[in-house]
Amino acid sequence: MRKKITLIVSLLAVLLLSGCWDVTEPQRMYYVDGIGIDYKDGQYEIYMQIINFANVAKSEAPTPQAAPSEIGFAKGKTMEEAFFKLYRSIDQKVFWGHMTFLLFTEDALKNENAIPVIDSFLRHRETRYQILTFCTKEPIKDILLVTPLLNKSLTASKLSNPMHTKELQTFVEPVDLRKLIIDLNEPSHEVNIPTVAINKNWETTDGPTTETALTGFGIVSKNGFKGYLNDGDARGIQWMYDKKTRGDVTIKLDNKENDHLTVDLEKLSTEIKPIVKNNKVTFEADIKLNAIINGFEGKVSTDEIRKGIIKEVKKDIKKSYAGGLKIDVDVFRLSEHLYRKDVKTWKKIQKDGKIPLTEDTLSKINITVNKVNPGRKTFAETINE
C-alpha cells in the first residue's frame, strides 16, 4: 500500500513540472552583438549587428563559408519604432543577452538624444550593465563591417572585447553602461566615452585591410555632447586614472641631437588632493610609476631616464587639462575629488555639479619613478661596436 501511495505522489509531482516547451533552440535564434545609433532629421537611425556564432564555438578558426555578421538598418521617430521595423524583416527570434556594445555618432549624443537610448537598454530584461559604449566620427556601417585581424571572430574585435588592447596599452579606458550612468550622476556630470576610428595600417596578400582603433574620447554630459579629445590631447588622462594602468612615453636624451628613447610605463597609483584656501580650490596630483627600458643606444643613466619620464608625463597631463578647458570639460573629474573630500566647500562653489576651473587650478604635479628596469640585466648595450 505504501508503495502505491509513493508512486501516485511521484506521478502527481511530475505533472506539476513546468517542462521546456516554450524554450527556443539556440540555432533558431539571431544574436545581437552590437547596436549603432545615429540621429538625423528628427529620426533615430539604427544599425543592428547580428553575429554568426558558427565562427565562435569550438574553434578559433572561423567557418569560411559563413558570413561573420550581417548589419540591419531602420529608422524611426523613436528607437523602439526603428527596432520594430527591423523585426519585420527578421525571420527568427532575436536574443539580446550577448549584446556587447553601443556605438553612437556625434549627432546621436547631442541635445540629450542619447538619454532615452541608454534608458531603453537599461530597462530591457535581456540586456546587461556591462554593455560597452563608444562614439565615432566615421560612418557607423563602415565600422560595423570591419572584421578583426586574421579574420578572427567578431567576439574578439576591439568593440566587443577592448580589454585585450588594454593589456598592451591603457590609452583609452573602456566605459560600460554602469560607469556611464555613475559618471553622469556624479559631479561633474560628464563622462569620457572612447572614440572609435577606422585604421588602415594593415595589409594582407590580397591587398590593404582595415581595423578599428581607439583614438581618444568624446565627452558627454547630461545636456548632450561637448566635444572630442583626440590622441595627443587625450594621452594625459591615462596618468590621472585612480587605478593601475600601462602606457608609454618617448623621451629626448640629454646632450644628444637625434637620440630618443621610448619607455614602457606602469602607473602604480594616482592621488589627487584638493587644497582649500579662502574658498579657492587648487589640486595637487601625486603619481607613482615604474619604468621598463626595452632598447637604447649608447650610455644612459637612470637619473637621465627619470628626468625625461617626469618631463613627458607632466607635459601629457598639462596638455589634456588644457584641451579640456578649451571645451569646458573637467577631464580629470576634479569636481568629484572635491565633492568626495570636502563637500561643504564643493557646495559653496559648484554650479550644476561642476566647480570653476582655470589654468592654475591644477597647481602641482608630483611624479615619482620608483624603478627603472633595463629589461634583461644591465644598462650596457647588448651589441658592442
Image (cartoon, helix red, strand yellow):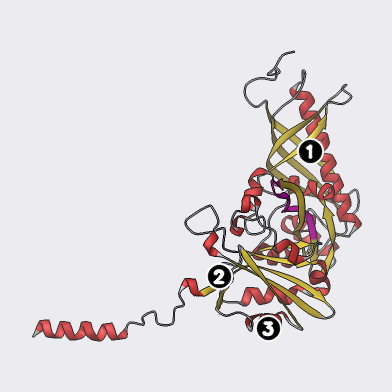
Of all residues, the one furthest to the front in this rendering is: 206
User: Residue 97 — which label?
Assistant: 2
At a point 72% along the width and 67% down the height, the residue shown is: 185
Q: Are marks 1 and 3 in contact (CB under 8 Å)?
A: no
The answer to which of marks 2 and 1 sits earlier in the sequence is 2
Secondary-structure class at tag 2:
loop
Q: Give the label, 2 or 3, closer to the camera.
A: 3
Looking at the image, which is closer to me, 374 or 58? 58
Q: Main secondary structure of the magenta part?
A: strand
What is the three-letter code of the residue carrying label 3? Lys
Q: 59 left or right of 369?
A: left
Was residue 88 drawn as part of the magenta stretch in this picture? no
User: Residue 366 — which label?
Assistant: 1
Secondary-structure class at tag 3:
helix
Q: Which segment is the magenta one?
A: 204-218
Q: CA distance from mark 2 to mark 1?
A: 45 Å
User: Residue 85 — which label?
Assistant: 3
What is the three-letter code of the residue carrying label 2? Gly
The quadrant holding residue 260 is top right
Q: Give the label, 1 or 3, closer to the camera.
A: 3
The answer to which of marks 2 and 3 sits earlier in the sequence is 3
- Within 10 angstroms of label 3, few (less than 14), some, or many (20 or more) residues? some
Whether residue 256 is situated above or below residue 66 in the rendered picture: above
The quadrant holding residue 25 is bottom left
At a point 77% along the width and 44% down the height, the residue shown is: 285
What is the three-letter code of the residue carrying label 1? Asn
Which quadrant: the N terminus? Answer: bottom left
Looking at the image, which is closer to me, 192 or 211? 211
